[in-house]
């Protein structure tokens, strides 16, 4: 079939409505699909969801209805009566005689294995009390502590104590404890103190058989991380208790979100809008051949994803699909944030519009972040790489910091905590929120050491120590033993914790290196990100790419919590320390430059001070020290105080001082950190809040933002966060003593501006909160500036 759109994007018809897909009511259903070059499109209704495997085929069960072509390349039909419980496909005919039958790319509900789109009443999928469920508040992105988790890994192991193993339902089980009384499951997450649970892909993906709950054959795992999209707008069925009932997976997904929200945990979805698992059998090719994918100069599919294709996000209808999809998840499922896989393959304009529109229209506290890299070469010019996020309201993973802390991702390469000298400066650059590197604000950097990809933290440290063979790790290739045999048996014979004794756990070198890495992340400026199980010394038995390695490798061993309880308690206390003290969560570049000073950065030691009640902290001066040497060192303390209170050292972490240090030096144990403060007192207010309400005569706020200076907290771009009374509202934080600050209203990066001169907002009449109304300069509206406080 001809690729009608290769090198001809401008020829595509555009549809701007937000009603593509199925619009169901009991009285009748409207079906709309974008297929601009089709000669004919028909709706095909079915009574069943299709066979267990293979594509849905023409059958006697089918009922065909021709669709009418409307403006914008959309085909539409309305079927009277209640179609709930039926299934449907689209039959698309092209001028060259090609006929394709495919599921609706906008499918909100699908049959088992996504073979057919399903017709359900979405209102009936809401669990009891869903109308009371709400997005959780997040005052600032730096307040988040993110925990990356795979749905199946969370509960599948026998030690989880969870009955709904591997399912969405697992998150609804509370009150679970191990034999020693330690919390398990969702209660563990709440006890740990994280704020956001980042779920690896939970939309419908391709490579897991939803009807097959166990391994197909010895050595073959029915498992995947999910980075192989099939239906972007429907939940994955293998995590539901009944994949054959299209409504069950939706209801149970909502129950999971509801349960996490009840525990005070926000939900982040890992989304994959950079590629599809397949092109010919993917969700788009049947309807707009060639349009949804990028091509190189020769017309071949480009491969910036590393898996054979990449979506052309810069094209209007691809961008529209992504934004419509995200709106669906945020509005229908109350999702609190999104993490973008290979965000480098998404153009910066799309990322900017996504962030702006979702916050203004749905949730002002939505958190957005992603991977600022690609998986290969791409013809995309406007890649969202590190630095492209400046001022745009979203964050990127800080791989500079990651590599400085641990070294390379899979090999012997060392970093600060794994024994490499000369990494102190790079670590310091990460500690200050990368504001002198690639970020304008600490809210733009996600700080981490490991994630689902590559060796996890424990296994990376073991690799550097050269003890993989001693641990008897299995030799794996794509989820299977290279020499054959039972992976489960091989894992049973392995011992990732060789040489560790629980009685002296915190004296163990590997444990100390692990805690030091976690401690750096949790006390640095920016957004901390943890990989599930780090707090229990999780191992994946040396598997650096466990995307299909199954439960034997990936399952979280909950028995490790009791075994390594001091490690859990250390992480828990560091998280509590961060959440209790705003000095570790500074909000702007100017605030960091004023409040944080690196005073040692050599010889395997990095130390810094957070001074003068940084961020409005009750502790006047806070000192944080990291020693990556295996031996103890004597290192200096600031001269601003003669006595210091220790709340974190090599033995424990906490919120209360458990010993004191006097003088200008302190002994820092090998492979350890220390946090000290001098005195506790009433700080001044950290900032004054200025609400800027912007009113435009045309009501169009797309792309508009504030450029501010003189705030003392965060100068530069400030985005509008929400709508109120038809006006866009931005929140600007300024130092309490600030009397005025400058601003310019502009579109995107200076594409246009409102007014030709710099303007200033007088905020001297209040030291707490100021509200300002600004109207645009069009003739239809009088220019005015009013203030209330």
Image (cartoon, rainbow, N blue to C red):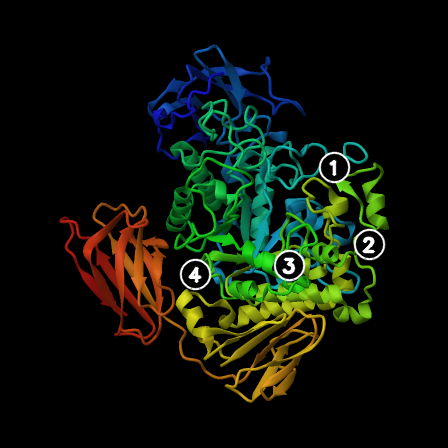
Q: Is residue 495 above or below residue 182?
A: above
Residue 684 in the image: state x and y as whole percent: 41, 79
Q: Is residue 37 above or below residue 181?
A: above
Q: Is residue 600 above or below residue 254?
A: below
Q: Considering only order in the chain, which callout, 1 or 4, is on the residue closer to the N terminus?
A: 1
Residue 574 in the image: state x and y as whole percent: 61, 69
On the image, numbered disc 3 is attached to which residue?
A: 406
On the image, numbered disc 1 is attached to which residue?
A: 221
Frontmost of labels 3 and 4 is: 3
Q: From the viewer's side, name the closer residue of 15 and 510.
A: 510
Mark 1 Cα-neighbour bin, 10 Å: few <14, some 14–19, many ≥20: some
Q: Work out how far the residue at label 4 is from the one at label 2, CA to CA, in angstroms.
A: 42 Å
Q: Say which element carries label 3.
A: helix
Left or right relative to 333: residue 407:
right
Q: Work out how far the residue at label 2 is from the one at label 3, CA to CA, in angstroms.
A: 20 Å
Q: Say which element carries label 4.
A: loop
Q: Work out how far the residue at label 4 is from the one at label 1, CA to CA, in angstroms.
A: 43 Å
Residue 423 in the image: state x and y as whole percent: 59, 63
On the image, numbered disc 4 is attached to which residue?
A: 441
Q: From the viewer's side, name the closer residue of 417 and 187.
A: 417
Frontmost of labels 2 and 3 is: 3
Q: Considering only order in the chain, which callout, 3 or 2, is on the residue closer to the N terminus?
A: 3
């Amino acid at each position: 079939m001809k690729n009608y759109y290769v090198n001809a994007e401008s020829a595509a018809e555009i549809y701007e409505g937000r009603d593509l897909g199925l619009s169901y009511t009991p009285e009748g259903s409207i079906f709309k699909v974008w297929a601009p070059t089709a000669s004919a499109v028909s709706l095909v209704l079915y009574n069943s969801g299709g066979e267990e495997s293979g594509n849905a085929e023409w059958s006697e069960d089918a009922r065909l209805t021709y669709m009418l072509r409307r403006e914008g390349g959309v085909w539409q039909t309305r079927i009277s009566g209640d179609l709930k419980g039926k299934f449907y496909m689209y039959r698309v005919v092209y001028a060259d005689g090609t006929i394709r039958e495919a599921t609706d790319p906008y499918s909100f509900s699908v049959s088992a294995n996504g073979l057919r789109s399903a017709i359900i009443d979405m209102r009936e999928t809401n669990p009891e009390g869903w109308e009371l469920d709400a997005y959780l508040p997040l005052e600032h992105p730096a307040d988040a502590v993110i925990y990356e988790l795979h749905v199946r890994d969370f509960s599948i192991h026998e030690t989880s104590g969870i009955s709904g193993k591997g399912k969405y339902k697992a998150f609804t089980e509370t009150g679970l404890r191990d034999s020693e009384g330690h919390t398990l499951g969702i209660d563990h997450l709440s006890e740990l103190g994280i704020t956001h649970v980042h779920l690896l892909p939970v939309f419908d993906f391709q490579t897991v058989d939803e009807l097959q709950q166990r391994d197909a054959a010895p050595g073959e795992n029915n498992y995947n991380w999910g980075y192989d999209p099939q239906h972007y707008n429907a939940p994955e069925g293998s995590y539901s208790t009944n994949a054959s009932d299209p409504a069950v997976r939706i209801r149970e997904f909502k129950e999971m979100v509801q349960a996490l929200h009840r525990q005070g945990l926000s939900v982040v979805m890992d989304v994959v809008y950079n590629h599809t698992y397949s092109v010919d059998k993917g969700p788009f090719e049947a309807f707009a051949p060639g349009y949804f994918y990028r091509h190189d100069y020769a017309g071949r599919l480009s491969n910036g994803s590393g898996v054979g294709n990449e979506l052309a996000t810069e094209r209007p209808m691809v961008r529209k699909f992504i934004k419509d999809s995200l709106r669906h998840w945020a509005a229908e499922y109350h999702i609190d944030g999104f993490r973008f896989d290979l965000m480098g393959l998404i153009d910066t304009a799309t990322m900017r519009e996504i962030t702006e529109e979702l916050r203004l229209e749905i949730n002002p506290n939505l958190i957005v972040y992603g991977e600022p890299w690609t998986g290969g070469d791409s013809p995309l010019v406007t890649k969202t790489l590190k630095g492209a996020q400046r001022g745009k309201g979203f964050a990127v993973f800080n791989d500079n910091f990651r590599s400085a802390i641990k070294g390379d991702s899979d090999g012997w390469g060392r970093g600060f905590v794994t024994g490499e000298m000369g990494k102190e400066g790079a670590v310091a650059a990460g500690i200050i929120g990368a504001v002198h590197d690639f970020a304008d604000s600490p809210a733009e950097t996600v700080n981490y050491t490991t994630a689902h990809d590559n060796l996890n933290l424990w296994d990376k440290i073991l690799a550097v120590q050269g003890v993989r063979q001693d641990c008897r790790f299995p030799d794996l290739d794509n989820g299977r033993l290279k020499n054959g045999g039972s992976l489960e048996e091989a894992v049973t014979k392995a011992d990732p914790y060789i040489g560790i004794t629980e009685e002296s756990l915190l004296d163990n070198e590997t444990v100390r290196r692990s805690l030091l890495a976690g401690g750096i992340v949790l006390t640095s400026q920016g957004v901390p990100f943890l990989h599930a199980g780090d707090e229990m010394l999780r191992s994946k038995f040396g598997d650096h790419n466990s995307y299909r390695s199954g439960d034997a490798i990936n399952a979280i061993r909950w028995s490790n919590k009791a075994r390594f309880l001091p490690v859990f308690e250390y992480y828990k206390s560091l998280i509590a320390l961060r959440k209790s003290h705003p000095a570790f969560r500074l909000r702007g570049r100017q605030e960091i430059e004023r409040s944080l000073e690196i005073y040692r950065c050599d010889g395997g030691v990095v130390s810094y001070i957070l001074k003068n009640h940084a961020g409005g902290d009750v502790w006047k001066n806070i000192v944080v020290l990291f020693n990556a040497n295996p031996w103890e060192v004597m290192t200096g303390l600031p001269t601003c105080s003669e006595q210091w209170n220790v709340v974190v050292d090599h033995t424990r972490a906490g919120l209360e001082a458990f010993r004191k240090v006097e003088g200008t030096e302190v002994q820092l144990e090998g492979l350890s950190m220390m946090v000290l403060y001098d005195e506790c007192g009433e700080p001044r207010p950290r900032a004054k809040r200025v609400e800027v309400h912007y009113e435009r005569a045309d009501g169009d706020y797309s792309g508009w933002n504030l450029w501010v200076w003189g705030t003392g907290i965060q100068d530069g771009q400030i985005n509008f966060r929400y709508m109120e009374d038809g006006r866009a509202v931005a929140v600007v934080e300024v130092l309490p003593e600030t009397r005025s600050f400058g601003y310019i209203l502009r579109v995107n990066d200076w594409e246009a501006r409102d007014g030709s001169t710099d303007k200033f907002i007088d905020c001297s009449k209040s030291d707490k909160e100021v509200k300002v109304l600004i109207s645009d300069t069009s003739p239809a509206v009088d220019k005015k500036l009013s203030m209330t406080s």
